[in-house]
Image (tube, rainbow, N blue to C red):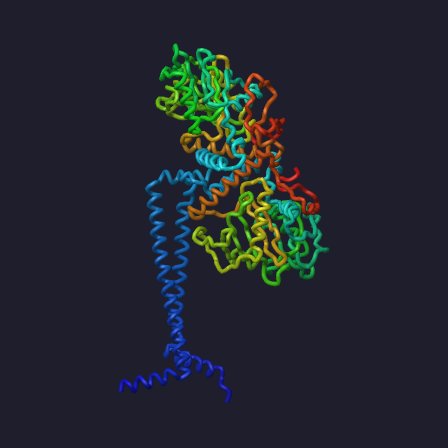
Amino acid sequence: MSALRRLARGTIGRLPPVRRRDTVIRELRSRVRARERRIAQLEEDLAASREEAGSTRRQLARRGTEARRWRRMVEEPSWHAHVRHLRRVHGVTGTLPDGEDMPIRSVSRKLANYRLAASHGVATPRVLAVWSDADEVDLHPLPEAFTIKADRGAASRAVYPVRRRGPLLEVADGSRTLTAEDLVRELRDTQAAGEGLPPHFAEELLEDSSGAPLPVDIKVYTFYGEIGHVLLRAVHRHGDPRGTRRRYLLPDGSDLLQDNHTEVPVPRHYETVLEVARTLSTVVPFPFLRVDLYDTPSGVVIGELTMAPGGPQRYPDGHDRRLGRMLEEAEARLYQDLYDGRPYAFLYGDAPTDHLPDVRHAPDSPVARWPGSTRRTGSRP
Amino acid sequence: MTPTPTSRRSVRQVLAAARRRVGLELAPETVARLEGRIETLETQLRTQTRLHYTMAPTPAAGRGRASWQAYVRRTRRLYGQIAKLPDRDVVPHWRLPRKLDNYRLAASHGIRVPTVYAVWDRIDDIRLAGLPDRFVLKSDGGSTSRGVFPVRRDGVLFVQVDGRRRFGPTGLHEALRDLEQDGLARPPYFAEELLQDRTAGPLPHDVKLYCFYGEVGQVLVRQVPEHGEDRSLRKRYVRPDGTDLTDEVPEPQDATIPLPPHFEEALRVGVVLSHAVPLPFVRVDVYDTPDGVVLGEITLVPGGRNAWSLEHDTHLGQLVEAAEARLWRDLARGRPCRALYGEEHPPTLEPASAGPGGEG
C-alpha cells in the first residue's frame, strides 16, 4: 500500500506542471528563509547597537562633566584643544625632511631668539661664551656668577644659574652645590639624551627687580599682536616644580584666577613687558607665541620663546574659550599677512645685533624682513 | 463566446486562490509582514547607529587625539573670523568658493573644466538669447546648489532640466537677484555647458574627493537622479583604494553604486588641485563624464555633522595634521601663501579676476 502511494507520488511528481509547482514552492520557501535570516541578523545588530549605545550613555553619565568639556572643546574655540593639536603637529614636523629648520621647531633655539629679539631693540642677557659641544665647555674664564644653558632644551633642563663658592659652584637659590666637572658631565648627559642640544653657552646671571634670588619668570601668552594673559611664576628652587607660586594677570594688571598667589609682585616694568611681548608676537609666523621675559633692575630682558607650551594648559571654561577665540582671530590675521607677502619666517628688525653670537634659526635661509601690513591690526581696534 | 471583464476577473481570483491553496504563491499578507518587519528593523538600526554617534560626537578630540570633526568646526569658525576682517578678499579661505577662479586654476594644471559660454559682472547684464538650448546658469560665489540653474529653453521660457521649476523670460534674473539680496549668490554670473549633455543617460558621476594637501583621504561617490533633489540621493563612501567605508561612516550608503570609470584620474585631479591651494584640506568635487574627469568646484569644508566612527575621525584628523605640517614646511621653504598656477593652459576666462588666493 505504501509502496503504491510512493509510486503514485513519484509518478505525479514527475509530471511537468507538478514539477514546476514544486520548484516554485522551493524558491518561495528559500525566499522566506532568506527574509527570516535577514530579520534575525537585523535583530541581532539592533540588540548589539542598543547595547553599544547603552554603554556609551552610561559612560557619558559617568563622565558627565568631562564629556561635556570634550564636546565643548570641539564645538567652541578652545585653547586647551589647540595646544594639544599644536603638540601633535609639532610631532609630525619632526619626521619631515627639512623639519628641523621650520619655524615651529627652530623657535626653540635660544641664541637665535636673542638675536631676533635684539634686532627689534629688545634687551637680552649678556652672552659670555659659546661652545659648540658640551665637551668643550670651559668655566674657568667666567665671572663669579653666571648661567650655563643648552641652546635647545625645555623646562629648565640643561639650565644652570650658578655662583662660585670657592672651588665649587652653587645653584643660585642655594639648593645645590656641584663641581665644574659635575656640571659638564650633566650637560654631556642631557645632550646625549637629546634634551639639551648644543651649542652650549654662558650668560650673565640675571637679577630680579624684586630682589628674589631667582628672577620671577614672566610668561606672556600672545596672539599675533594681542595679549591673552600674563603668568608670573616665582620658582622656589631651581628645577623643582614643587613650591612654585603662580599668579595670572590680565593685560590691565587685574588678577585672573581666584587661587592666584597675589604675593608674587606685579613686574615693575609691566607696560614694557606687554609692549615687548606684543612686538615679538608678530615677528613669528604663529598665531600663538609664549614670550618669556625677566624684569631685571636694568629693564625687561628676553628669556625664551615657545610655540606650544607644556603642562596641562587647563583654565576655567570661560577663559579657555576666550583664549581659543583670540587664537582663531590671530590665525585669520596671520593668513591675511601671509597672503600679503609676509614670509613664513622670523622677521628681523634693524637694531644692532653684533654684540651677540651669529646663531640663526635656519642657517641656510636668508634673514627675513617685511615692512608689515597695513591690515596687521585686524578687525579689532 | 467572449468572456466578460467580470467573469475574467473572477476566473483570475479563482485561479489565484487555487494556486495559493497548492502553495504556489505566498499569501500577500505574509510577504507584507516580513517586508514590513525588515523595514522597521532597518530604520531602527539606522536610528540607533546615528544616536550612538550623536551621543559621542567628539571622542577623538576629547581624548587629545587628532579629530576630523574638530578640524571641520575649527575651520568653519576661522572662516567666520576671516569674514569679519577688512580686505578679507585676500585670504585663501575666503576666495576658495569662487568657481571661475577655480576653473582657471584647474585649467592651468591641464584639468578639464566645463565650457563657459559667457560671463557677466551684473545680473542686469545677463543675456540668455545667444546661448545654446541647454545650459547651466551659475553664480560665481554660490554654495551647494543654490545659485546654480541647469535649464533648457522652451520657447521664450526656461525649464529646469528636472522639470521642477519653470522660469519666464526674466525669471532666472529674478531668482538670482533674490539670492544675491540674501547673500547666497555673488557676482560675476556665468553660463556653462550642461555636463549631462556629455552622457547619454542621467547626470554624470558625482565624485567628491576629500583632499589633504596632495593626498586623497576619502572619496564620496553620489548618484543624484535629479538636480538639487536630495531625497533621491544615494551615496557611497570609499577609501582611495576603492574599498568601502560602510562601518566608518554611519550614513545610509549604497555599496552597489559603481566606482566612477575614471576613478584614478579623479584621484590625480584631487592630488594636483589640493596641492595647488595653500590649505591643509579642501574638498575637490568633480564629475566623471565619458570625456574624462571635469572639475565641479572646490570647497573649504564639507557641510553636515561629520560625526563618524572614532577610528575614522582620528584617521582623517591625523591626515589633516600631517597636511598642516607639510604645508607649514613648504611655506617655510618659500611657497607663496596663495594658489599656485600651472603652465599648461593659460587661463582665458573673462572677465579676468584673481584666483583663490591668486594674483591679488
Residue at the far right: name it: B130
Tell me how many marks there are: 0
Residue B139 vs residue B192, the one in the foreground: B192
Residue at the far bottom: name it: B1
Residue at the far left: name it: A1
Residue at the far top: name it: A166
Where residue A48 appears, as percent x and y from the top left, is 35, 54
Whether residue A192 is situated above or below residue A11 in the rendered picture: above
Whether residue B93 is situated above or below residue A313 in the rendered picture: below
Whether residue A219 is situated above or below residue A44 in the rendered picture: above
A170 left or right of B231 in image: left
Whether residue A120 is situated above or below residue B64 in the rendered picture: above
Residue A3 vs residue B112, the one in the foreground: A3
Does residue B203 appear in the picture of this structure?
A: yes
Where residue A228 appears, as percent x and y from the top left, is 48, 27
Where residue A256 appears, as percent x and y from the top left, is 42, 25
> Which residue lies at the image location 62% right of the left edge and 33% below the top edge?
A340
B244 left or right of B196 in image: left
Where residue A45 appears, as percent x and y from the top left, is 37, 56
Does residue B140 appear in the picture of this structure?
A: no
B29 left or right of A370 in image: left
> Which residue lies at the image location 36% right of the left edge and 53% below the top edge?
A49
Assign the C terminus of chain B to one quadrant of the image. Answer: top right
Residue B63 vs residue A178, the one in the foreground: A178
The image quarter containing residue A34 is: bottom left
